[in-house]
Image (tube, grey):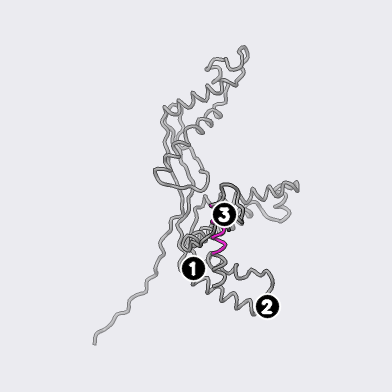
Amino acid sequence: MTKTTSKSKTTTKLPTLNDGSIKLTIKINKDKIKSAYGKVIVESAKHVEIKGFRKGKAPIKMVEASLDKSKIYSRVIEMVVPPEYSKALQKGKYRPLIEPNLTPLKMEEGKNWEFQIETAQAPEVKIGDYKKYVKSALTLARKKHSTKNQVPEKNDHYELNAVLDAILKNAQVTPAKILIEHEAGAMIKKLESQLAPLKLKLDDYLKSIKKTKEELQKEYFTTAQNNIRLEFALKEIVEVENPAITDDEIKKANPPQGQESYVHYLLQKQKILDILVQL
């Protein structure tokens, strides 16, 4: 008799998906810096008033001495970094979604400069068999709902919530931390603008709800993370299904000029959700 040996079970590890992080190091030649510096001084000379000279007529050396060096270099950075950043994006074929964070690495006077730039583009997304897991989630949600409510309530969105929860739970997508922080920061700024008409500062509002700023940031980070994950997953489903949108539908939506493509996507997304809810 031949003896059979049982194979040991192995755990399949899911591949790590690209989170869309972009980290670049750009170098600025000292000659470009010197040229930009000179242009800043010349431009400033037109507006600087120095005693004993008519406006715009003071010697360049005196103008330079009267200016705040930190402000001069801030303007120089604005002149020399964007072109090099643009070149780096084109070379790497990157498509950033947010403004970059800029960190100086080397900024010695008279030498080449070096900066680290961090931003993010769309992460890699795996949606899996979304119709299968959405249908399963809907079946369970309908069963629970029918047990609780014999008569369906008007405007009850439990099915839509079940769809969104299923996608969020099953889709594989990990956005870059900087993208989540950017979104969470925007949410906090929106809250501050909402509090402004009430003449209420954020710190006072947090005291009233008994939360620290760190707790609010953590809460908003989690919310932003889920919102971004869900949006990218839905976008992937839209791209897979590519539901047709007519010109009449776009016209009826009355998009602002230049926003036609975005409105077209929103209409597609709504159609997808309508389809999934009916599974």
In which quadrant of the rendered view does residue 124 lie? bottom left
Residue 41 location in percent, x, y?
A: 53, 23
Disc number placed over residue 96 in the picture, else none: none
Mark 1 closeness class: few <14, some 14–19, many ≥20 residues within 10 Å: some
> Quadrant location of the N terminus?
bottom left
SS for dot 2: loop
Residue at which label 1 appears: 130
Q: Residue at x 56, y 47 (%)?
A: 258
Mark 2 / mark 1, whichever is N-terminal: 1
Identify the disc placed on residue 149.
2
As helix, strand or loop, the secondary structure at mark 3 comes to: helix
The answer to which quarter of the image holds residue 85 is top left
Q: Residue at x 63, y 76 (%)?
A: 145
Question: Magenta: predominant secondary structure element?
Answer: helix
Spatial CA span between label 2 and label 1: 27 Å
Q: In x, y percent, where is residue 55?
A: 61, 17
Q: Quadrant of residue 83?
A: top left
In the rendered view of the protein, which quadrant contains the C terminus? bottom right
Which residue is denoted by mark 3 in the rendering? 263
Type of amino acid under label 3: Val
**Residue 101 at x, y percent in the picture:** 51, 43
Tell me which numbered mark, 3 or 2, is placed earlier along the sequence: 2
**Mark 3 or mark 1, earlier in chain:** 1
Compared with residue 61, is residue 181 higher up or lower down, i.e. above or below?
below
Labels 3 and 2 touching (C-beta < 8 A): no
How many numbered markers are drawn?
3
The magenta span reads 261-271
**Three-letter code for the amino acid on which mark 1 is drawn:** Tyr
CA distance for labels 3 and 1: 24 Å
Residue toward you, 189 or 154 = 154
